[in-house]
Amino acid sequence: MDMPKITAPPLKFFPDSTIPFYFCLNSLMFNLNDQTMKKLLLAVSCLVVAGAVLAQAPNTVPMKMPLPDFAQKYGLKDPERTVPLNTDRIYWSHPKGSIATAGTRTVDRVPIGSSFNAYTLLVSEQQCLVARPELNMVGFVHRINVSKSTNSGDIVMTYSTDGGMTWDSTNKWTLAYKNSTYPRGRYPQGGIFNPAGNTDPLGTYAVVSGPITDGSAWVANYLSSAKTGNTDISGVSANIHLDGAYDMARLDFHTATNNVYAIGAQYDFDASGGPFGGAFVMKGTWNANTNSFSYQIIDVDYSVFDDGVNGELFYTLGNQAWSPDGQIGYVMVIGCDNDQVAQGNYPIWPILMKTTDGGNSWTKVNADFSSIPAWEEYLFASTDGSYRPFFLPSNAVDMFLDKDNRLHIVCQVISQYTNHPDSVLFYLVDANTGTYPQHIFDVYETATGWDAQYLTTIQASPVTTSVTPYADQLTWDARINVALSPDRDTYFLMWMDTRPDFETYNLYPDIWGKGWRTSAGKGDTTARRNFTEGTSLDANNYWMFVGNYALYDGSKYKVPVTTSFSTSGQFDGVTSHTHYYVQGIEFSDTDFPIGISEVVAAPMKAEVYPNPVNGAYEVKFNTTSAQVDVTISSVSGQVVQKLNDVSVSGNRIRLHSGNLTNGVYVVQVIDGNTVHTCNLVVASK
């Protein structure tokens, strides 16, 4: 039967800039006679009417963002069913009854294994899907297949040695954790460790981590490994860390040259929450003599602001990013930093710690995210006219180091209401819709500070307990995640999203993706792409995981992606779930609008007149060129128009809005090694 239709206000995708009409009037009115003034007011009024919806920033109102219930989200144990299945929601069916049109894409999925229930899948921070591009190898970490054991706490890695083309869950799997004293391993994640000099996929090791429960409380964490292909407990090397103050070593996982790193939280998930002591890193060091890992627990302490009413103000428990050699690392929580509060500031943004010696010592990164130019283009103005970023991981968050070991934080950013200590948790929404645009940004480190690039906008709202089809109230978000190219110079953002004509909540997700390059010589972004629309997977992709690396064959990038669903087809979290590898999630070098041989500098500002536009318009920019190329994209990143060899006259090009529909567009003028950018508003068509 169909899931019930849930209605919610539509999302507003782009907060448009306000044209300062009042400034123009104030600067002119004292020199004008009455008749001229009337004509000017009439002309301005017409322009206001023509572009009111698109050219003015919407009225906004503040709302309070509740703090996450970490004990509920991360502290779930495997429950017996406490409520009956809702038969109105039990089976999935397409929201339109059937797939409307057959697509041309060759996207399909193949089963790669199963788990006893859905509790191996709950949060996107887990690194369950991993790739080794140098070996053309992909692995998926999960609780053991139903057919292989009666103990659901055994942890395995199912693997493919031909880039995900073929899987064999009967033969190609590795028992990576099994322990008779602590049998209940839960919430697994992991990586593929490749010892120095090895070129054989069967010479690698599956390394996994996660928490252990005794059935009533969280009692330990495991860091365990086994040689690829091992199926016997005698081949498992398990480290058990017993300390109730350190929980959930399942928030991210990285492999390095000689180390592995799992991250968790200094937080009591068995209590009502708190106090938050910070993050911890479970570091494993490879011993080539014993072919196993020794481990140590590294505290990464944070001091977050307690406002005396809501408690400690933080929205994540810990994320990490590491260089390939394991020396440079960052650990992040998102919250209100006590050091900022001491300076009279109350932001909700990343609090960063950095190491340059493999985690032995950590220093605070004094990052300031307040003055990034992108905020003025995409955020609502605060009460004082400034644009205050509010980093919100409601659709997950990812972070990584690029080839220059500079940090990138991929996250949703909304608009903070004010800098007042009594309203730290308040954000701005459109007064007409009661919503905020779910913009996703790449916030990245530069040589002099921080900058940000808009990537995409999530269309559907996260699934909450009030709308989930799961009887046991499992919820999910867009599960944004990034896969890197092998050289860490090209990045692929993947997410789950539901089309607006289907549902306003993310109940019928497709797999979406977008690629971007930030370094010199590698161009800009691809258009965002819905990979599964019109295929057999249309609107039916749940519990997505994305590999840490994409596989590259010289011209094409294959992004590892898995989804999972109840083996019976029911929305039932306590029954067996089958895991699928999704084939056909690919990008090519030609998908990038600027060729890989071109060296593109940081974007420079251009000016558009008139704006809004209905017909002819000019783009002004500084140049010595006689001709330029032009790319016009929607705010979601889709290229809608390309123009080559456009003539330049007097630092201007003349264009026409032509067939562009009403909306906001990004104009890129490609001038040799420089890109000039501006926003274009098309109105009154």
Image (tube, grey):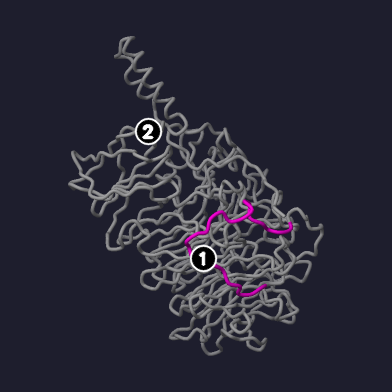
Residue 100 is a magenta residue: yes
Return the residue at label 1. 107
Return the residue at label 2. 612
**Which quadrant of the figure has residue 435?**
top right
Residue 68 place in picture, x, y as percent:
65, 52
What residue sits 33% from the left and 58% below the top? 523
Q: Which mark is residue 262?
A: none
Q: Quadrant of the N terminus?
A: bottom right
Residue 86 place in picture, x, y as percent:
78, 55
Viewer-closest of 663 and 658: 658
- The range drawn in magenta is 90-114
Mark 2 element type: loop
Would you say the magenta stretch is mainly helix, strand or loop? Answer: loop
Residue 341 place in picture, x, y as percent:
54, 45
- Residue type marked 1: Val
Mark 1 element type: loop
Measured Cα–Cα span from mark 2 to mark 1: 40 Å
- Residue type marked 2: Pro
